[in-house]
Structures are given as structure tokens and as C-alpha cells.
Image: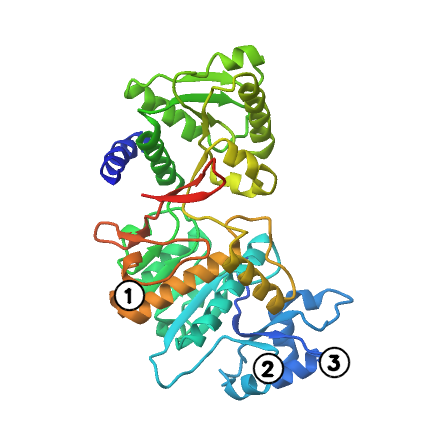
Amino acid sequence: MNHYFKYLLTILLALVCTFSNAQTTKWKNMHQVGKHETIFGIAKTYNISIQDLIDANPEMKVPGYELKKGIWIFVPFSKSGDKNTQNILEKNKANIIPIKTINAKANVIKIGVLLPLHNNDGDGKRMVEFYRGMLLAFNDLKKEGYSTDVHAWNVPIDADIDKILQDKNISEMNIIFGPLYSNQVKALSNFCKNKGIKMVVPFSINGNEVAENSNLFQVYENDNLQTTKAIAAFLERFHKSHHPVFIDCNDKNSKVGSFTNILRKQLELEKISYDLTNINSSDTNFAKHFSKSMPNVVIINSEKSPQLNAVLAKLNILTKTNPGIAISLYGYNQWFMYQDYDLASFFKYNTYIPSTYYYNKNSDKTKAFEKIYFNTYGEPINNIYIPRIAINGYDQIQFFVRGYKKLGSNFKGQASSIKYKSLQNRFDFEKIGQGGYRNKFFQLIHFKSDQTLESIVY
């Protein structure tokens, strides 16, 4: 299977290719507000000024703001110096997620986080959630004897990355996670390359710095590579055994048009016949495009929920009037967001979804993580996004800290080199030429007709 998949991948790659002065803050801790605590008291506890604390938490500047028990706030380093917080942590264990841990019996792994950690916009809020997941991973790793020294810098979209990199603490890091924005990647990459620091780019970016820096790990592949792998997996699994049926959903704003167009071209190159129909076709005409002698695999040209539901309704009529027709669906990872109401249909139509992750809301480990997150931060994980941002942060820290602890600077991101079963995001990196490493992990999540799930890894 893998040999044919790689062969198709090689062919398809060729086809696919046819505010200045921004504030930068470095956080020391996150503090959970206790009963009767005040801004003055918290600032005094950490030996920072009230203004420093307010600047680190912009929401405090809103008229009428009240400090409420149970909420979490950022605690910055004192501008007068890096005050050791070990005594503070001992006195306030119930209120603090320690970002800095010291263990004399083990080598300390120094972690830097350079992301937009603020509440000013959607990017910042998502990265705060990502960072919270990272902190929970650090806490779990500490229980296993891992020792980390973690520093975080707020790096918004308009930050002067060169100015941030002048902070002497950054050059002492073993691993740096960031940045979020593509225009900041080159400067940070050059810095990490010169300093011998492992650099993990945790989200999708534009550019090809991974080919220039042997210390860079790119977690997400670009859309072209993902499309190519999805097409190769489709051909490997269905090209001899199924009849492809493309359904036009009349979605002018579709984000998956390149996938369906390239797939159709590849089928034509391999002289594989397929049918094309429209969601608005009459039931009689719609049925004519499906084979009764071999299984059908349905591909639609929209990733959106309304279009998917319209197709499912159409297929329900088809299979009711033609009970002998066999159907599979080949979908998109956006469909994971629709599981609450489409899960039964996914099983019914033997659905395959190509992806690098899978959020299993029914997993006991996932439920346990979400409970800890809620108990720690006083609010649930944002359920708008899949993959879940906080779990992504948790998985990335677990993977890289374990790998670095075991192999140090020789860690190359290979899944076989460490023992960690991800909650959601899986990683297995491959070297890119003379440069760095890119996550090659790819799978099909298969919703089987017997109501079970399987992950088909390539």
C-alpha cells in the first residue's frame, strides 16, 4: 500500500505544482485569582508594579473591570529584573500554574514560546488557549519527572521580531515554539539557526524556511501537499474497486475546488471513468450516475455543512429507492465539525476523511483533558475549532519535550523514537533535503458501517 501511495504522491506533486512599536510582554506565570484578592495585592506578591500587571492584561483597562475569583490572569516578569518565584509558588500552589520548574536531579529543558498571547483579537485568544494546553502538558510531564524552564513572549502581528530577539533569555532556549505569522518566520529561523535552537512552527505558514534551517520543525504541511496526499490516498484505495461520482453542490465559495479538479484530471490521465451530477438534479436523473454492479465513492465539491446535508438527503432518497446501491463518501476534515448531527450518516455511508488529526470527543482521555482544562481555567475549551486548539498545544509539548529529553539535539521528530499516544494531533517528521523537518503524518479516518472507527495511516 505505502509503495503505491508514494508512487502516486510523486506523480501528483508534479501535477499540483502545474502597529510599529508594538508592545512585547514576557509572561512569568498565569495566576488564578483567589477570594478577596486585589490587583494591588497580586502585583505586590510578584514584586511587579500595578501598571505592569495591567499592561499584561489589557482587559483590566476596560472601564468597570472587576477582578473576579477564579479567573486567570497573566503575570509578567518584573521590569526591574527576573525575580525568582520559587517561594511564591510554594505559598500559592492553588492559584498558580508554574511556568518555571526546577529539578536538580534532571537536566532542565528550556522552552520558549513566541506567539500572540493576548485577548485583543481572535488570533490572540486562540493562542492563549493553545498556550494553556501547553501549560497543562508541562504539569503532566512534571509529574513524570521532566523538568522544564518555560518563558513566553507576546508576539502580535505587528511586533518587531528583531527587537524581541535581543532579549538575552531567548538565546538560552533549547526549543522555541513560534511564530504564528509568516512574516516573522525568517528572522526567528535565522536566529535559531545561528544559536543552534530547535524551532517548532506550530501552525500553517507561507514560505519554505524549512528547507533552509536544519533546526526547524514544521508541524503543518501546506495545502498543496495535503491535497496531493488526499488524492494519492483516494486513488490507492478506490481506483480499481469503486465507481467515482462527483456531485456539484453549486458552492461558488468552495475551498476544495482544487482537490476535486485535480482528482478528476488524474482519473482522466489514468483512464478511469467517473460520473458527474448536480445536487439539483431530479431524483431519477441523479440515480442514473450511480453504478449498481460495483460500489460507488461519492466526492462533493464543497466542505460546508448545508451542502453536505443536502447531499446526504439526496443519498437517503437514492438508497431507499435503490437498496442494492453501495456508497462510500470521501470527505474533508471540516466535516469533523459536523459530527454532532451527521455522525450516523458518516457511518451509514462508510465515510473516509483524510487528515493529520482526529478529535475524538467520546474518548475517555479527551474527556479527562477537557475536564482538567475546565477545572483549571474556569471555562471550557472553545468548541468552534477542530482540531481543538488547547489539545494541539498539549500534544505538541508532550511530543517535543519527550523527544528532546531522550535524544537532545539529535531529536529529529520521528514518531518511532518516542512513546507518546497523542490525544488529537499526531506527528512524524521527515527531513527536507539539507534543511529541517516537516510533519509527514497522514491518515484516513474511516467511519465504518459497523459503527466503529479506524485510522488508516500512510
Quadrant where the image shows the N terminus:
top left
Residue at image x 41%, y 67%?
165
Residue 119 placement (x, y as % from top left): 61, 60
The image's mark for residue 36 is: 3
Quadrant for residue 342, please give it.
Answer: top right
Residue 82 versus residue 258: which sits nearer the camera? 258
Quadrant where the image shows the C terminus:
top left
Residue 121 versus residue 384: which sits nearer the camera? 384
Inspect the image, locate mark 1, and give the three-letter code of the amino acid beneath it.
Asn
Q: Is residue 305 left or right of residue 354?
A: right
Q: Is residue 45 above or below residue 341?
A: below
| Residue bearing the label numbered 1 | 194
Label 3: which secondary element: loop
Residue 350 placement (x, y as % from top left): 46, 33
Residue at image x 53%, y 83%?
80
Inspect the image, locate mark 3, and give the three-letter code of the amino acid beneath it.
His
Q: How is the image coloured?
A: rainbow
